[in-house]
Image (cartoon, rainbow, N blue to C red):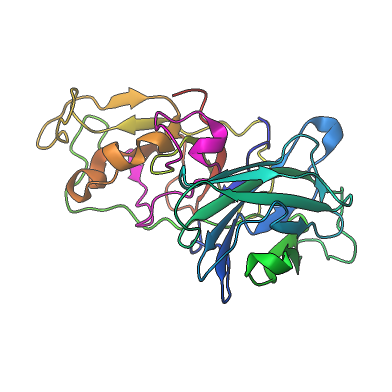
Amino acid sequence: MHLRKLNLLVMVCSLLFGVNSVRAQTITLFPDEIPNGIAAVSGDQYHQRFDITLTGSPIPQSRAFTITIPAELAVVTNSVTTTTSGSNLRSFFAGSPASNRLAFGITLVSGILSGSKVTVEFDLTTPTSFTAVTNGGKVDTSYTVDFSAGSNLTDTNVRVAKHQNRPIRTVSFSSPDSTVGDTTKGGGRFYKLAFPSAGLPDPSHTGISGLSVSAGFGDTRTDVLYTFYLSQDSALVRRPQNLDPVAFASLMSDGTGGGPLLGTRQRERDIPNTFIRENFVTLFAAAGRDSVNGVISLGGTVDDAVYYVYALADPAPGP
């Protein structure tokens, strides 16, 4: 499985984003941790998403800002893309003034820039080992975002961590919700993952991926496939070849808007092993249904043992 687009996410700690607030913009980076060993020769790529929310009194510029890439990180050729939150402005990639620097412009079509969002995405490769980072350790560094003098925006650094053979930990899941309970034929053999209130993070903007059913510039729905894995190893960085995805099932009754299978011994409805983030809002977010709607199989696990939940994230194959 390709690391492209995205990353191995270990779901055992709180949701983290690299956020930097300054006078005239807020910049969010996801993910804000980067592993070593993403090799170009193997075709692996590691995705980065910047969301820049413009505030104050920003002014459009043909060369509005540059992003300087930290040492030892290499941007994949032709992977740089950008889009905006609305049709009132356009953003565009203006080339690389230096091998480690990306330039972007902003054009105002109508209205004002304040409150708008510019999204920048690109893929990276990394060396086999980061310099001066201990095995299993990490070192903090930063992207430098320089805004042009005429943009009325403020230069800032966006924190990111280099991980040396260390898992990427970005999503938190809580214990199963027992309020409703699993009363299906598969009772006792499934585990409900309680997602964070904001849902799983979306590493790719709809307007960039082009895969979501959403139209226009909106990013209200997403297009990421999350495939879950179980392992007793708490320190996996890459998926072992013999580690297969866990089975995934829905405990909802068939039909649009159907309720959960309560008080029955009906067979749960199997769906593909991969949980499709595209459907999170409509199928997996309602509080009552959420307690039984998305479950992973515990088949093959051992009693009285600790298991860690991992996930690989990739773009959805289509709308």
The quadrant where residue 234 appears: bottom right
Q: Position of residue 8 (x, y in %)?
A: 62, 45
Q: Position of residue 120 (x, y in %)?
A: 63, 48
Vertical arrangement, residue 280 with respect to residue 253, above or below: below
Q: Position of residue 289 (x, y in %)?
A: 20, 43
Q: Is residue 100 magenta?
A: no
Give the dominant element type of the magenta stretch: helix, strand or loop: loop
Residue drawn at (48%, 56%), measured in percent from left and top? 116
The quadrant where residue 137 appears: bottom right
Q: Is residue 287 left or right of residue 216?
A: left
In the rendered image, the quadrant that contains the N terminus is top right
| Region of the chain picked out in magenta, as a range | 189-218
Q: Is residue 54 left or right of residue 249?
A: right
Residue drawn at (28%, 37%), measured in percent from left and top? 283
| Residue 316 vs residue 264, the one in the foreground | 316
Residue occupying the far front of the picture: 110
Vertical arrangement, residue 20 with respect to residue 174, above or below: below
Vertical arrangement, residue 111 with respect to residue 217, above or below: below
Residue occupying the far bottom of the picture: 23
In the rendered image, the quadrant that contains the C terminus is top left
